[in-house]
């Protein structure tokens, strides 16, 4: 058994901890989103929605609660999409030649980068959950300790698979690119539609039909379904819309993410096997 | 999977009719050579001659296109994994992570090659001593000098006790003093039994270090041999002359029996001679004087690798062009 991926993981975590500014900003950024965007939007939306009727059995949640789930997803998306950047730097200025000329199988690079990216996303997701609850997001309301534990594990499982998918994508792109500027461009191009064509900040219902279809299959939407199910519950009202999640809905979302991650893994493998670095 | 067994002094690298092209451009154009066990073998040639491309095929970073190549008894196409396990590499560009420490760089490398922990840790200590970086153990590589970085890379190349160590332009960009110290390290490593394959565009480097030199230009090997053999092909001594009429002088001197060959230079010409130059020089001066050609400058020297190179390629080695071997060269195949 080759533990090459553990080596890649170790090295990437060294960098994560060592780059203080990157570390701190990656932890602060989601908190700032929540604090500024979240509180501002929440205060205006909540007053608009205050008179809406709530169906029996469901409970109304504040906008802050609704979008906090979206912020976890957004942060995971950004961190993961840029998680492969190290490969591009390694290719141009660092260890990629050494790694590719070594006997270690190339998929270990992909897996190592994936695991370190997931670790970073876990840290961020937990920070957002804690900070969100502190400023008033209604996560895990009325849950017992056991229920909270299950919910957190569930959220992290969703975050992990989603993060892996985008880390694989990012790694596959990075190993094919020549310049950080080019990579930055592609990433910016990708984040926009993925983030806004999802249910992170608003419900999908009002979307035009084709966008609705697109958004339903968006991995971002699948992730957010999972987070809301575990953090808020299976029956709630937000922004005037009644959300009901069944267990099969959630299993379907999770399976969707797994399929997405597998496809991205295949893509990354293909790109890595084709990569020539001299 | 079966490799041919290696016997003493047997070829450790064998290359036959190797060709490599980037599109239409043939970077390596049908080269063949062998490197024997325990040797220091040099590829000497200008930037862009095809040295790095050839090395990249041998270390399996580039897929072999045409020809045959085996390293340490393993075919680079059939057994790339075995080749990788048998070699150490120091790349042309610095390939260190600026934010990892010296120790971490070596530890990472050892893990990359699945070295067991105890062996890995022991080897790191040995190598830090060998390249005199013990005191820099916990320093991040960005804070090392150019020479220290190179030494660290050599140590890294040696981590796995490779059979062959590939050094691609190991002293590029280093100051003369540091270069000479690097040569000492390389010689020491060789003495311990590691075969060394080196590329360089520095004549003196090839001259000082190598048992065997192949001069390569435009993707072809022009001549191979020991440094002594190569210089001897030029004759015993070389006389440099600048005269009032160089063309006439060259014509005249070509008729002298002791003159072996003449190479023109911008302001004068080089005469290589068969016999001891100090004996031939008076004859040359006399011959020129009789033809009323006055001599402005005269210089007698033993042939250097420069002279060998100029003689066989018809040009002086081109010096580093900025960016060509630069840190951020993204072009395929640095040279």
Image: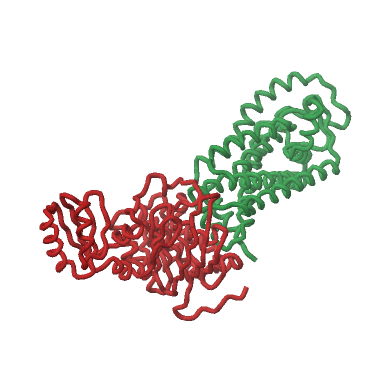
Residue A209 visible to the viewer: yes
Residue B135 vertical position relative to residue A75 in the rendered view, above or below: below
Between B111 and A66, the one lying in front of the other is: B111
Residue at 62% x, 29% y is A35
Horizontal placement of B295 versus B264: left or right? Answer: left
Quarter assignment of residue B303: bottom left
Residue A206 vertical position relative to residue A96 in the rendered view, above or below: above
Q: Position of residue A14 (x, y in %)?
A: 52, 51
How is colour applied across the structure in the image?
Answer: by chain
Total count of labels = 0
- State the quadrant of the N terminus of chain B: bottom right
Residue at 33% x, 53% y is B315
Residue at 53% x, 40% y is A180
Horizontal placement of B212 versus A166: left or right? Answer: left
Between B288 and A106, the one lying in front of the other is: B288
Horizontal placement of B2 versus A264: left or right? Answer: left
Residue A243 vertical position relative to residue B241 in the rendered view, above or below: above
Q: Position of residue A259 (x, y in %)?
A: 76, 47
Q: Position of residue A262 (x, y in %)?
A: 73, 50
Residue B204 visible to the viewer: no
In the image, farthest residue toward the right = A56
Q: Position of residue A172 (x, y in %)?
A: 63, 47
Shown in green, the chain is A
Name chain B's colour.
Answer: red
Quarter assignment of residue A126: top right
């Amino acid at each position: 058994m080759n533990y090459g991926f553990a080596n890649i993981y170790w090295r990437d975590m060294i960098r994560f901890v060592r780059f203080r500014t990157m570390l701190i900003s990656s932890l602060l950024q989601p908190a700032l989103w929540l604090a500024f965007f979240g509180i501002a939007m929440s205060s205006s939306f909540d007053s608009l929605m205050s008179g809406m009727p709530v169906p029996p059995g469901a409970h109304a949640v504040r906008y802050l609660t609704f979008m906090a789930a979206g912020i976890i997803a957004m942060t995971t998306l950004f961190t993961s999409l840029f998680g492969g950047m190290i490969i591009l730097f390694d290719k141009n200025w660092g260890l990629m030649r050494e790694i590719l000329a070594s006997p270690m199988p190339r998929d270990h690079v992909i897996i190592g980068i994936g695991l370190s990216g997931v670790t970073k996303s876990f840290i961020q997701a937990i920070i957002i959950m804690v900070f969100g609850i502190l400023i008033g997001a209604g996560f895990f309301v009325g849950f017992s300790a056991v229920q909270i534990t299950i919910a957190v594990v569930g959220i992290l499982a969703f975050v992990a698979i989603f993060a892996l998918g985008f880390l694989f994508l990012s790694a596959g792109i990075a190993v094919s690119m020549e310049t950080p500027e080019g990579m930055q461009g592609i990433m910016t191009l990708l984040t926009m539609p993925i983030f806004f064509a999802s249910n992170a900040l608003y419900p999908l219902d009002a979307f035009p039909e084709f966008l609705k279809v697109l958004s339903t299959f968006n991995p971002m939407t699948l992730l957010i379904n999972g987070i809301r199910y575990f953090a808020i519950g299976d029956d709630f009202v937000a922004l005037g819309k009644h959300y009901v999640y069944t267990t099969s809905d959630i299993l379907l979302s999770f399976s969707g993410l797994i399929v997405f991650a597998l496809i991205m893994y295949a893509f990354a493998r293909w790109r890595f096997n084709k990569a020539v670095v001299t | 999977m079966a490799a041919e067994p290696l016997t003493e002094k047997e070829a450790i690298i064998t290359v036959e009719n190797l060709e490599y092209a980037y599109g239409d451009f043939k970077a390596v154009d049908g080269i063949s050579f062998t490197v024997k066990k325990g040797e220091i073998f040099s590829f000497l040639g200008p930037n862009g001659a095809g040295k790095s491309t050839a090395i990249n095929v041998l270390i399996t970073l580039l897929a072999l296109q045409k020809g045959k190549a085996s390293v340490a008894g393993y075919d680079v196409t059939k057994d790339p994994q075995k080749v990788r396990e048998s070699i150490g590499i120091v790349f042309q560009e610095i390939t260190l992570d600026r934010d990892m420490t010296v120790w971490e760089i070596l530890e990472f490398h050892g893990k990359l090659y699945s070295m067991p922990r105890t062996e890995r840790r022991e080897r790191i200590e040995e190598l830090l001593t060998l390249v005199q970086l013990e005191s820099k153990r916990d320093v991040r590589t960005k804070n090392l000098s150019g020479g220290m970085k190179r030494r660290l890379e050599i140590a890294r190349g040696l981590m796995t006790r490779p059979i062959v160590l590939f050094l691609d332009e190991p002293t590029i960009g280093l100051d003369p003093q540091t270069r000479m110290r690097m040569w000492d390290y390389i010689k020491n490593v060789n003495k311990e039994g590691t075969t060394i394959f080196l590329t360089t565009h520095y004549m003196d480097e090839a001259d000082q270090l190598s048992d065997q030199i192949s001069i390569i230009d435009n993707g072809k090997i022009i001549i191979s041999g020991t440094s002594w053999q190569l210089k001897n092909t030029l004759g015993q001594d070389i006389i440099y002359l600048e005269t009032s009429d160089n063309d006439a002088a060259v014509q005249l001197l070509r008729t002298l029996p002791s003159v072996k060959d003449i190479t023109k230079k911008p302001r004068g010409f080089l005469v290589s001679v068969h016999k001891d130059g100090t004996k031939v020089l008076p004859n040359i001066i006399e011959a020129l004087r009789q033809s009323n050609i006055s001599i402005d400058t005269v210089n007698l020297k033993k042939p250097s690798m420069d002279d060998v190179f100029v003689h066989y390629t018809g040009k002086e080695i081109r010096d580093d062009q900025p960016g060509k071997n630069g840190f951020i060269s993204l072009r395929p195949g640095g040279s």
